[in-house]
């Protein structure tokens, strides 16, 4: 069965153009990665949940912010690992300094027997569309193109 995720691409307009809010994954694997490592705030959902509801839930879990307002569908992509991601756009203006992500535990360092807790998202940042394309994992870049098309 194909794993499915849903997420939200917040955007804001200003006189110089548009910016989107991306999140950087937490944990030791991603600590030193930047270009090609950022993502939209997203997470997995079951067949019992609708993608829009899952996107709102996951956005709140990963950022601490409520995604209030109308969501604009940006379609679905298949990531390199096979997971299908459905995204929605939301015009909003969140302050990255107020990010509050949920946490996960993993053994770290590997084979140490010690469990450590890490934020699922360690930071969020607004990027212009061209820079966002560079920062995003490769397959999610299509969401930036689709955002430009629908707006």
Image (cartoon, rainbow, N blue to C red):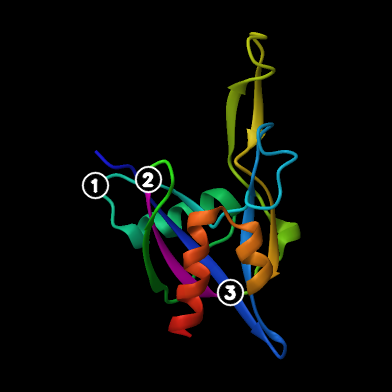
- Looking at the image, is 45 positioned above or below residue 87? above
Check disc 2 and report its element: helix, strand or loop. Answer: loop
Q: Position of residue 59 (x, y in %)?
A: 51, 56
Depth check, mark 3 against mark 2: the one in front is 2
For disc 2, the marked residue is 83
Please tell me whether residue 87 belongs to the stretch shown in magenta.
Answer: yes
Marks 1 and 3, how far apart at CA: 28 Å
* Residue 21, visible in the rendered structure: yes
Residues at marks 1 and 2, CA–CA distance in whole angstroms:
14 Å
> In terms of secondary structure, what is the magenta stretch mainly?
strand
Q: Determine whether 117 is above or below 82 in the image.
A: above
Residue 91 counted in the magenta span: yes
Q: Residues within 10 Å of mark 2 (few under 14, many from 20)?
A: some
Mark nearer the viewer, 1 or 2? 2
Residue 11: image tag: 3
Whole-percent x, y for residue 106 in the image: 59, 23
Sequence-first tag of 1 and 2: 1
Label 3 to label 2: alpha-carbon separation: 24 Å
State the extent of the magenta-drawn residues as a range: 84-92
Residue located beneath label 1 in the image: 47
Q: Can you say whether 76 is above or below 93 in the image?
A: above
User: Where does the N terminus fall, quadrant-wise?
Assistant: top left
Q: Is residue 43 left or right of residue 76?
A: right
Q: Residue at x 72, y 87 (%)?
A: 16
């Amino acid at each position: 069965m194909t794993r499915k995720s849903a997420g939200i691409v917040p955007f804001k307009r200003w006189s110089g153009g548009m910016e989107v809010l991306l999140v950087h994954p937490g944990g030791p694997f991603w600590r030193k990665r930047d270009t090609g490592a950022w993502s939209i705030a997203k997470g997995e959902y079951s067949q019992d949940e609708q993608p829009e509801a899952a996107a709102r839930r996951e956005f709140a879990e990963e950022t601490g912010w409520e995604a209030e307002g109308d969501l604009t569908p940006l379609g679905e992509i298949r990531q390199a690992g096979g997971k299908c991601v459905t995204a929605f756009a939301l015009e909003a203006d969140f302050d990255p300094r107020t990010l509050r992500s949920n946490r996960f535990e993993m053994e770290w360092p590997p084979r140490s027997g010690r469990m450590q807790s890490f934020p699922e998202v360690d930071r969020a940042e607004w990027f212009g569309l061209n820079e966002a394309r560079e920062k995003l994992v490769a397959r999610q870049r299509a969401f930036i193109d689709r955002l430009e098309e629908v707006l």
